[in-house]
Image (cartoon, rainbow, N blue to C red):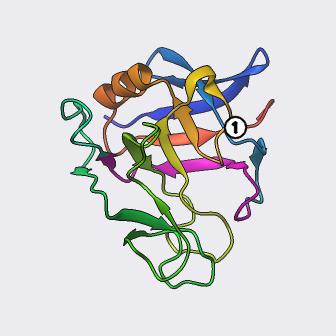
Amino acid sequence: MSGEILVTPTNGAWCLEAAGHRFPCAIGRGGVSGAKREGDGATPLGSFALRELLFRPDRGAVPRTALPMRPLSPAMGWCDCPADPAYNRAVTLPWRSSAEHLWRRDGLYDLIVPLGYNDAPVSPAAGSAIFLHVARAGLTPTEGCVALHRSDLLKLLSILTADWRLTVRAAGG
């Protein structure tokens, strides 16, 4: 069964809604944007496929989800250099240009769902590494991703399937 995950502003805060559940969430420090650019800190507006779940196998049980899954390793990264042919793709570290490390100490990337943003096809400098992932304490802003408390993300993962989409809307959108 397909479904939609809605990310919208509600009463001055951001909220993620899916299948009758509502969770507080964090978005990018740059707000939302219909013209996302690399490094602007904005979360892109639009509707995006859920590509897969990447998870830290050393940080808890394998999550319950119908999404395709693969474990993270310390050598996994995500290219964020617009001039690199691997821009906005998973890469093996060390990488020849700038790449984000996916194996983090802070727990934010213990669970990562890459969103289908700027990946089919990739447009250089239009933004990279847009994920649904674990939030910082206090739901402080991300660099452009959508983030949930770990327990909320695990609950969401347990109810969705690969044909669901995550939609980010602006106020009144």
Quadrant containing the N terminus is top left
Total tally of numbered discs in the picture: 1
As rendered, which of 140 and 20 lies closer to the eye? Answer: 140
Measured from the top left, where is residue 118 in percent x and y?
Answer: 57, 65
Q: Is residue 112 left or right of residue 63?
A: right
- Taking 37 as reference, is 156 above or below it? above
Is residue 38 rendered magenta in the image? yes
Q: In the figure, 85 relative to 80: above or below?
A: below
x and y percentages locating residue 97 in the rendered image: 53, 80
- Residue 52 position, x and y percent, is 33, 50
Q: What amino acid is labelled 1 in the image?
A: Arg
Q: Residue 22 magenta-drawn?
A: no
Packing grade of label 1 (10 A; few <14, some 14-19, many >=20) is: some
Q: Residue shown at 64%/49% (left/top)?
A: 46
Q: Which residue is mark 1?
A: 169
Q: Quadrant of the C terminus?
A: top right
Name which quarter of the figure residue 138 lies in.
top right
Circle 1 SS class: loop
Q: Residue furthest left?
A: 61
Range of magenta residues: 37-54
Question: Can you say whether 19 is above or below 85 in the image?
Answer: above
Residue at the far front in the pictured view: 105
Q: Left or right: 112 with respect to 7?
A: left
Q: Residue at x 59, y 26 (%)?
A: 25
Residue at x 41% of width, y 54% of height:
102
